[in-house]
Image (cartoon, rainbow, N blue to C red):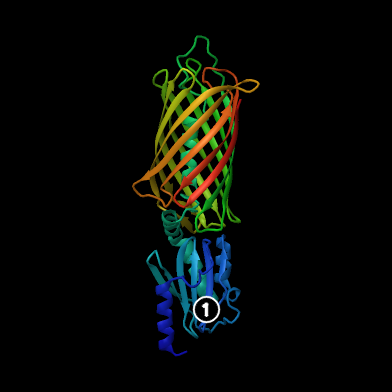
Amino acid sequence: MNKKLIKITLLAAGLIGGSLAYAGCDKSYAFRVDVAGTPGTTICDSKATTFVDSLQNFNFSNAGYTSTSAALVNGRFSDVNISLSYAAFSNTLNYNFVELGDSGSFTGATRQESQKLLEDYIKKNGIIGKIMKYQAQHSASSPITGAGGLIPMTIAGDFTAAFTNSPDAGAGPKAAGAASNNLIGANVLLGSYNVDGSSDRITYASLPLSYTIRNGMDPRSQLTFSLPITVVKTGDAQTAQTGLGLSYRIPLTDRWSIPPSGKYSVVASVDRATLSKLYSASLSSVYVIPMSSFDVAIGNMVGYYKTGKFSSGDYSFNPDITNVATRNGVMVSHPVQLGRKMTMEYTLVDTRYFGDKPFLDAYQELGVSIGTNKSALDARSFFRGGIQYMRGQSVTGIQANIGFWF
């Protein structure tokens, strides 16, 4: 192959990105090496480590590759296309992150060194942050903003604590001598999502822990500390989330309360090449309307969510994501007798983002639950269990939960 033909081929590869390499691959990471016009095997996986291993050894994709071959690489890293190329007998690695508009080259003493320079560049020069931001804006499986991602889980956790799972502050006037014992909460959540166009099912298991201090003068006033612990799986790739939150429920009237809250959270995943802090603040409103045989509760929340810089040694990551979201819901509850007095609840909740929207920018949830009395004026512990269906852009899912407060 002459030099002119090599240049034309390199240009074509850069223009078409990874379209050929991605045939049959619907996952976040892909890698294919073409040598002298002979296509390699497309490596398709849910884990970033597979991409890194392929970058270190082109022979994983194409056994015909040598250290002097003219090579074209089409890849995908965290849903961002990347094209790489070597001219014959050259150690200069040309790269182009297609959607990010970031391109350049590295020249090492060997091709292995050139590839290591690219790997270090990805880790240490802010590219990971840009990749995470692009993925948040274009993928329903982003570990930060996608289904089961840190921001949606934080939004849902804040709203659930204020609206459905907390000791109900909208429980009427304070009774004389009402008890005000504190409560430890443990709520188990199991969820599963299908994403259109992807064979990777997203599943999660979450354990939101809480401790609620009820005011001795008025138990409707409640200070709550929260500690959610969540593990998310996208295909066979794992992501971990945790955080520390604080909220204070303020009763404005016998039926209306507002709980402001704040939280510091972290998401981390080697498999998904994601590491980020999250600072969030929200303000909720809960209003209860009593009827003759049932109650209607209206919940509204607005929240602010901003990622922060995470640094460790030479590594620094900041996806620079800022979201403003609202979550609004209505809940109808009525008593049932199943061996003991219990309450059925039916909820419809809508979540929407404003400003800098993620790909999954609006979704609705329909749920039903059953449990014992959760009045703030009742000294007894309580439990609730239920199921919820979720629908959003390119995503459908279901969640089951059971919680105890004692």
Residue for point 54% across, 57% down: 272
State the image coordinates of residue 143 (x, y, percent, origin top left): 50, 51
- The residue located at (38%, 49%) in the rendering is 357
Percent x, y of residue 339: 66, 21
Looking at this view, is 225 or 355 the one in front? 355
Residue 136 lies left or right of residue 35; in this view the side is left
Residue type for callout 1: Asp
In the rendered image, residue 368, in percent from the top left (x then y), is placed at 54, 33
Q: Is residue 147 visible?
A: no
Towards the viewer: 382 or 94: 382
Q: Secondary structure at mark 1?
A: strand
Residue found at the very far front of the displayed protein: 293
Going by the picture, which residue comes out furthest to the bottom?
2
Q: How many marks?
A: 1
Quadrant holding the C terminus: top right
In this view, 121 is above or below 150: below
**Residue drawn 58% across the image and 48% down it:** 203
Residue linked to disc 1: 34
